[in-house]
Image (tube, grey):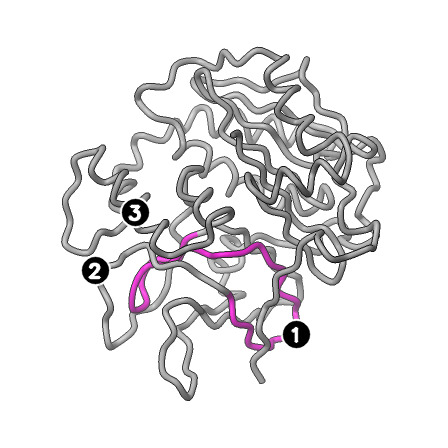
Amino acid sequence: MISCFLLFGCIGFSSHALCQLTYQHLQVQLDSPWTCGKLQLIPVRFKDPGFGEIDFAKGSVIGFAQALREGKLTVKETNTPGGDDVSLLEVKNHSKKTVLVNSGEIVAGGMQDRAIGATALLEPDDKETLLPVFCIEKGRWQKKSRGFRYAGSADAELRKEIDVAKKQNKVWKEIDRQLTDKGIQNVTGAYIDLYKDTTSLDTACLRFFKQQMIHGDSAYAGFVAVTGNRIINCELFGSSTLCTASYETMLQSYMRSITAADASPQVPKVVIQRFTDKFMENEEKQILYLNKHGRLYTSNERVLHLIAYDE
């Protein structure tokens, strides 16, 4: 039996559990940023370290990349009566843990490369689940599918089209823009060609940020990411367990979001404060802001993932 992942947001729900990622429960640590090279992360912590852990116990959730790497998850093209559907992939969790998959994560191969279109939890029930996806390689559609492999996470500009616009043509348009800007020409318009040269990733900074997380107090809900004179985005999760499971994915996305034109982080604290006020002061402001500039992903009336982009 195949189950289809359904997406819910705060709008239309009265349960308080849906929209609790506000200043009431969170603290933005503006005075304690983590900075390395061109990237700065401002931690956002839960005031109550146990917040959300009743739903997501420590160690009970692993990330999409880890699950694929360890063979605990299979991804394949859909096989429905109407034929293959480019906007869906069939996923099965074979492990004994819940797998968290984030919007913007990429699987390469198959009949064409795809980016995950929604944050979701894949329960350890070995059932086949249909996940919404976006094509990120518009010029290839192979009749015979290759196996899928994990290929990191999309940069913030592409993720914004996935999370906010939610339209395939907008995703392709953004990929075309980036390929043109970098002078890359390819037959299939493959997004991952932008990141074939992995030497551009600052491994020293990746190591620094991982160490900061390891030596922290583990009560992190997420981060505001900054580079140069701009805010990349803010990502928050419904528990520290979910944040930890997503951390390396976030780092990949942030690193891919930094351009040659960006300098060292120099966004004033007051600007960052104004940004977070727009969606963290209260639930009403959060709903209004995310309607145009972000997304809130939930599952069974539990918050999974909030992502907000600057205007």
Q: CA distance from mark 3 to mark 2?
A: 13 Å
Label 1 Cα neighbours within 10 Å, binned few <14 / some 14-19 / many ≥20 = few
Nearer the camera: disc 3 or disc 1: 3
Q: What amino acid does circle 2 point to?
A: Gly
The residue that disc 1 covers is 125
Tag 2 secondary structure: loop
From this view, report whether residue 148 is shown above or below residue 136: below
Q: How far from the left and from the top, in percent, is residue 212?
A: 61, 26
Q: What amino acid does circle 1 point to?
A: Asp
Label 3 Cα neighbours within 10 Å, binned few <14 / some 14-19 / many ≥20 = few
From this view, report whether residue 22 is shown above or below residue 124: above
Q: How far from the left and from the top, in percent, is residue 280?
A: 72, 32
Whether the magenta-drawn stretch holds residue 111 is answered as yes
Label 2 Cα neighbours within 10 Å, binned few <14 / some 14-19 / many ≥20 = few
Q: Residue at x 50, y 11 (%)?
A: 266
Residue range corresponding to the magenta coloring: 106-131
Marks 1/2 in contact by CB < 8 Å: the verdict is no
Q: Residue at x 57, y 54 (%)?
A: 119
Q: CA distance from mark 1 to mark 2?
A: 35 Å
Rendering quarter of residue 42: top right
* 201 or 51, nearer to the observer: 51
Q: Residue at x 26, y 39 (%)?
A: 177
Residue 139 tag number: 2
Tag 3 secondary structure: helix
Q: Residue at x 49, y 53 (%)?
A: 65
Q: CA distance from mark 3 to mark 1?
A: 37 Å
* 270 or 49, nearer to the observer: 270
Residue 173 tag number: 3
